[in-house]
Image (spheres, grey):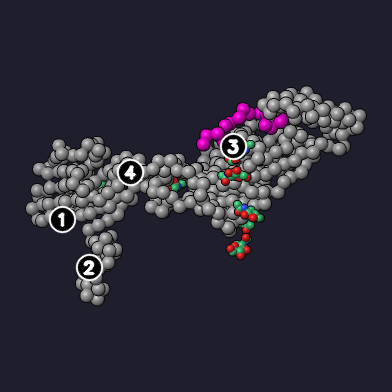
Amino acid sequence: MKAQAVLAFFFTLIPSLCGPQDASFSHVSMNEQIVTGRLGEDVILPCSFESGPNVVIHWKNQDTNVYSYYRDSDQLEKQDPRYVNRISLFHGEIHNGNASLSFRRLTLQDEGIYICYVGTSLGKITKKIVLKVGAFVTPVMKYEKNTTNSFLICNVLSVFPYPIITWKVDNNTSISENNGKEVGSLGPFHINSRVNITGSNSSYQCEIENPLLKQTWTGRWTRKDVLHKMQSENVLLSCKPENSFFPPNQDFTVTWYRVESGSALLLAYFKNSSQETLINQPRLSWKEELINSRDFSLTVKDLHLSDSGEYLCDISSNESTLLTSQTVHVEASPRAPAGIIVPVLVAVVSAVLLLSVAPRAVRSRRCIGFHRERHPPTNQDSSSAGTTEENVALSDYLPNTGTEDRS
Ligand SMILES: *[C@@H]1O[C@H](CO)[C@@H](O)[C@H](O)[C@H]1NC(C)=O
Ligand SMILES: *[C@@H]1O[C@H](CO)[C@@H](O)[C@H](O)[C@H]1NC(C)=O
Ligand SMILES: *[C@@H]1O[C@H](CO)[C@@H](O)[C@H](O)[C@H]1NC(C)=O
Ligand SMILES: *[C@@H]1O[C@H](CO)[C@@H](O)[C@H](O)[C@H]1NC(C)=O
Ligand SMILES: *[C@@H]1O[C@H](CO)[C@@H](O)[C@H](O)[C@H]1NC(C)=O
Ligand SMILES: *[C@@H]1O[C@H](CO)[C@@H](O)[C@H](O)[C@H]1NC(C)=O
Ligand SMILES: *[C@@H]1O[C@H](CO)[C@@H](O)[C@H](O)[C@H]1NC(C)=O
Ligand SMILES: *[C@@H]1O[C@H](CO)[C@@H](O)[C@H](O)[C@H]1NC(C)=O
């Protein structure tokens, strides 16, 4: 404010040197100030004056009466209904020359030019405040697939003004965001921006910027190499945030899913602020103690054939989401005694043949039963021969969380 005042003073002294005043100059006048608030939150429109007796204060927006004060009290008979109970002066501060307006629960319609007029026995002043209102609910990045395609979706529930959305593939190439779907023509906007994942590209990034609030959120998806494992081995599913992506001292959550066509099953969860953890399956464990850790890799012990599939780690803060996708292929152990494995293999093959023609819903139910009852004994010690519980696939542990169907 001070700099602007000095600048304005400087320019009025030397108008002949500057030639005709341009639009930006007349915009930045000594009495104008831009205030940016957030939708639903509170803001103060500042206005100060040299204190004196017989204070009269009027706040107006165009010709609308926002607030009036004189004879030492509020005069609100003519106040426009949309400001009722959302606006007040700091009464205790008026005698100190403070006519600032406290504005509560901002709406987008509150944007505009507000004029503060103050008169006292000593003189009068006029101040102009431009109020801008922005919204930016933290976006989310989702990974979904159906039987033929995989997608990434960057979703913002409420943003204003319309944000700048950029997608990049493999750090570098920009891809156009012609899939952005907006809801709400005047705002705030609800945006679902979606891209197809094509086979050879291993990382995608979407950036959503609100230029008014000077806030940027980034979503990033990367794919790790496919892991091949034998049945009853252990596997480490990797999930480590890159430092550049993950500034320290930020609150975040880590969520592991198993991704299937049309659904995602929650496997494990960690919240940094509360240190709350959740593991939904006895064969899963975090790689290390999570407190102060930066490695959220997950170990799956004693792999079953049905553990084959795609796993997704989601690290989210209010500034970013980092998704790491990892596919595991579990192969039947060749070391199992032939006398056991042959009849079991025959059963597996015939069951697979049979089930591949059955409807999908029925198939997944029968698979559960199959692995529970006829899972081949492992070649390890008797304890890993397994209880019924241990032979259940990870995906059977939880009902569908339905996270993919919200959009
Ligand atoms: C007026 O008073 C309020 C409440 O103390 C304060 O937040 C605000 O900054 C003051 N404004 C000016 C212009 O002094
Ligand atoms: C998968 O999604 C794409 C894009 O929405 C769609 O074109 C395709 O038909 C879907 N495939 C199946 C099998 O649902
Ligand atoms: C992309 O950038 C990240 C860090 O920003 C880096 O770890 C990764 O190797 C880069 N990938 C490519 C393909 O350049
Ligand atoms: C990034 O893009 C530039 C030019 O667009 C290209 O020369 C360079 O090879 C690209 N780098 C990567 C890692 O794709
Ligand atoms: C993704 O690709 C499929 C074909 O591979 C196409 O039918 C679909 O429209 C694409 N979806 C998007 C959102 O680009
Ligand atoms: C994925 O990579 C292939 C070649 O590696 C490239 O031709 C294609 O344009 C990339 N897909 C996207 C969406 O950029
Ligand atoms: C996680 O939370 C702990 C305590 O709540 C904090 O000390 C630590 O800085 C946080 N870690 C990160 C990476 O922000
Ligand atoms: C994000 O969260 C941190 C605390 O975890 C907070 O200081 C910061 O203001 C938040 N940023 C936004 C954009 O909400």
Image location (x, y in percent) of residue 123 = 10, 56
Q: Residues within 10 Å of mark 3 (few under 14, many from 20)?
A: many
Ranked by sequence position, the earlier of labels 4 and 1 is 4
Q: Is residue 53 at least partly visible in the picture?
A: yes
- Left or right: 102 in relation to 324: left
Mark 3: which secondary structure?
strand
Marks 1 and 2 in Cβ contact (< 8 Å): no
Mark 4: which secondary structure?
helix
Image location (x, y in percent) of residue 102 = 26, 44
**Rendered-image quarter of ligand 4:** bottom right
User: CB at mark 3 closer than 8 A to ligand 7?
Assistant: no
Ranked by sequence position, the earlier of labels 4 and 3 is 4
Q: Which residue is mark 1?
A: 125
Closer mark to the observer between disc 4 and disc 2: 4
Ranked by sequence position, the earlier of labels 2 and 3 is 2
Q: Which residues are magenta?
A: 392-407
Residue located 59% across and 54% down the image: 169
Ranked by sequence position, the earlier of labels 1 and 2 is 2
Closer mark to the observer between disc 3 and disc 1: 1
Between 244 and 134, the one lying in front of the other is: 134
Three-letter amino acid code of the residue under disc 1:
Ile
Q: Which residue is mark 3?
A: 269
C-alpha gap between disc 3 and disc 1: 58 Å
- Left or right: 36 in relation to 9: right
Closer mark to the observer between disc 4 and disc 1: 4
Q: Residues within 10 Å of mark 2 (few under 14, many from 20)?
A: few
Image location (x, y in percent) of residue 66 = 20, 43
Residue located 77% across and 41% down the image: 229
Q: Which residue is mark 2?
A: 9
C-alpha gap between disc 4 and disc 3: 37 Å
Ranked by sequence position, the earlier of labels 4 and 2 is 2
Three-letter amino acid code of the residue under disc 2:
Phe
